[in-house]
Image (cartoon, rainbow, N blue to C red):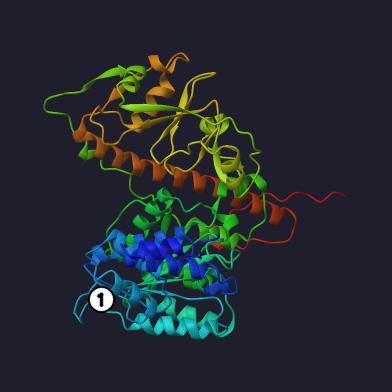
């Protein structure tokens, strides 16, 4: 006899009614295939929203308010991360049932700041009206309040027309929008083709056009734990005081006036994001968009670190180098073999593959379908952020995977270092040592070690240097593309240049052939 649906949840409810309610609500919502864009969100998006909400709450010392558009799963995820958070879901009967079952006291009216979250569904015909409601709620925020909006990219990021475009333009000019992120497709379970986007709003600000908006585009990334952590850390900068500088991993601060003047998508077209690929494919893009892209990245006016912070040690001390094989034998690190791929690595939207070519050029060109890879290689291990990926032949070379969740293809290997270990191995230093090593016997490679007190400062400075290097590569590829587009447009006669007289330089004119 087939047991009734959710029987195990009902039994579990005898011991943990709050968890049972959350699981039953989730299961029931998943069965509604006609919910469209109002359907349940994926666990990855729930995790992202919960992490971001809790991080903002801790940053501001705020209460959390979820309106009737939020799911019980989100309330449960927030409580899993922060049981002490004052969580108010009084606008949602489902969330109130869950909170009552978990014996969570509804916070009384207080003067504490509020982090609120609202979901905008794509079924609303009146996009302008929905944006107007968001703008109105943003104007009512106190200086320490924060509001998170998640909804269709078509309303929050993509180009609009008519009244909807004018409403969003007024919201931009008010200074309430502090961060915007484009999220991947496939995370609305009943509308898998709908891409999502996210906003962070704060109280209206003076001189809104002079501020910067944090923009991030992870539409082509898998929302792994590593990606979510990097994105949340970047978006937190939206609530930091003006003038505080920091390095970004996935986002970049863009002048608000540039976004307002563009009057188009709040985030550059995906084809413009990857400048090295764009330069190779020679796809045509308007020069204005390329010029706008030039100013989107971090400024490079200052060096990535202050050399005055590096001084001679009063008492020089260092840890002796050890053979990598001995370090592995003593369990200070692990060497994990790569996967012998049995699937084609030609899926443009799949999981990134780190193979010999990718390690040697630091450029990823292959991807595998996630479902096929999981089926063919159920026991394979993906990389983690901070792993050292290396090959031994024809000569040793290594890189540090800063993102994680990638396929490491044989003959490449993973060197996984325990960050809590006191042996002094540091991924960046290990990658340098491997790339300088002689011979293909990885067990004999000598590994330098770093004193515990210097590991974090070293990684911080190297991270800033990495970001500066990435920005220089992006701008170099962008400069090549601008030169190509400009040359083609002028040579083909489809455009012309009009320089100010002072900037114009006389050039010899070719004689017309008789």
In the displayed structure image, the side of residue 423 where residue 92 appears, left or right: right
In the displayed structure image, the side of residue 210 where residue 152 appears, left or right: right
* Residue 411 rendering spot, x and y as whole percentages: 54, 25
* Residue 440 rendering spot, x and y as whole percentages: 48, 15
Q: Residue at x 44, y 67 (%)?
A: 24
Please tell me in which quadrant of the rendered image residue 113 appears. bottom left
According to the picture, the residue beneath numbered tag 1 turns out to be 143
In the displayed structure image, the side of residue 433 where residue 260 appears, left or right: right
Can residue 213 be seen here? The reply is no
Question: Looking at the image, is 438 positioned above or below residue 94?
Answer: above
Which residue occupies the foreground of this view, 140 or 151? 151
Question: Looking at the image, is 131 positioned above or below residue 445?
Answer: below
In the displayed structure image, the side of residue 60 where residue 441 appears, left or right: right
* Residue 204 rendering spot, x and y as whole percentages: 33, 78
- Counting labels gives 1
Element type at mark 1: loop
């Amino acid at each position: 006899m087939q047991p009734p649906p959710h029987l195990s949840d009902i039994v579990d409810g005898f011991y943990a009614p709050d968890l049972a309610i959350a699981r039953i609500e989730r299961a029931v919502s998943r069965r509604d295939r006609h919910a469209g864009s109002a359907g349940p969100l994926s666990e990855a998006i729930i995790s992202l929203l919960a992490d971001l909400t809790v991080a903002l709450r801790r940053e501001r010392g705020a209460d959390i308010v979820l309106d009737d558009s939020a799911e019980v799963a989100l309330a449960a995820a927030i409580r899993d991360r922060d049981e002490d958070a004052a969580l108010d879901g009084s606008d949602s009967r489902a969330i109130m049932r869950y909170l009552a079952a978990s014996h969570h006291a509804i916070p009384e009216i207080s003067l504490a700041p509020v982090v609120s979250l609202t979901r905008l569904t794509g079924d609303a015909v009146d996009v302008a009206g929905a944006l107007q409601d968001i703008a109105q709620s943003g104007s009512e925020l106190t200086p320490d309040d924060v509001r998170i909006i998640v909804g269709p990219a078509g309303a929050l990021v993509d180009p609009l027309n008519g009244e909807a475009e004018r409403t969003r333009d007024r919201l931009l000019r008010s200074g309430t929008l502090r961060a915007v992120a484009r999220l991947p497709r496939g995370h609305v379970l009943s509308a898998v083709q709908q891409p999502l986007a996210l906003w962070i709003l704060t109280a209206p600000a003076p001189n809104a056009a002079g501020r910067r908006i944090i923009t991030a585009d992870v539409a082509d990334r898998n929302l792994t734990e590593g990606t979510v952590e990097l994105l949340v850390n970047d978006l937190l900068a939206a609530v930091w005081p003006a003038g505080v500088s920091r390095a970004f991993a996935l986002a970049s601060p863009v002048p608000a006036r540039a976004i307002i003047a563009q009057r188009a998508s709040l985030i550059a077209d995906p084809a413009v994001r990857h400048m090295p690929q764009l330069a190779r494919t020679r796809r045509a893009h308007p020069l204005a968009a390329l010029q706008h892209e030039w100013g989107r990245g971090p400024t490079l006016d200052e060096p990535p670190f202050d050399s005055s912070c590096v001084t001679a040690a009063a008492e020089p001390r260092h840890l002796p180098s050890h053979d990598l094989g001995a370090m592995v034998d003593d369990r200070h690190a692990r060497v994990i073999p790569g996967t012998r791929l049995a699937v084609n690595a030609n899926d443009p939207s799949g999981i990134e593959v780190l193979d010999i070519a990718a390690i040697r050029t630091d450029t990823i060109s292959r991807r595998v379908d996630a479902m096929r890879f999981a089926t063919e290689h159920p026991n394979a291990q993906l990389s983690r952020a901070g792993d050292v990926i290396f090959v031994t032949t024809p000569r040793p070379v290594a890189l540090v995977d800063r993102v994680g969740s990638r396929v490491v293809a044989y003959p490449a290997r993973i060197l996984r270092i325990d960050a809590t270990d006191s042996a002094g191995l540091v991924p960046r230093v290990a990658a340098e040592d491997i790339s300088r090593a002689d011979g293909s016997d990885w067990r004999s490679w000598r590994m330098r070690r770093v004193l515990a007190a210097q590991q974090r400062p070293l990684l911080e400075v190297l991270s800033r240097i990495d970001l500066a290097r990435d920005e220089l590569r992006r701008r170099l590829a962008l400069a090549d593309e601008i030169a190509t587009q400009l040359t083609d447009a002028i040579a083909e006669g489809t455009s012309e240049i009009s320089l100010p007289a002072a900037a114009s330089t006389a050039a010899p004119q070719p004689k017309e052939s008789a």
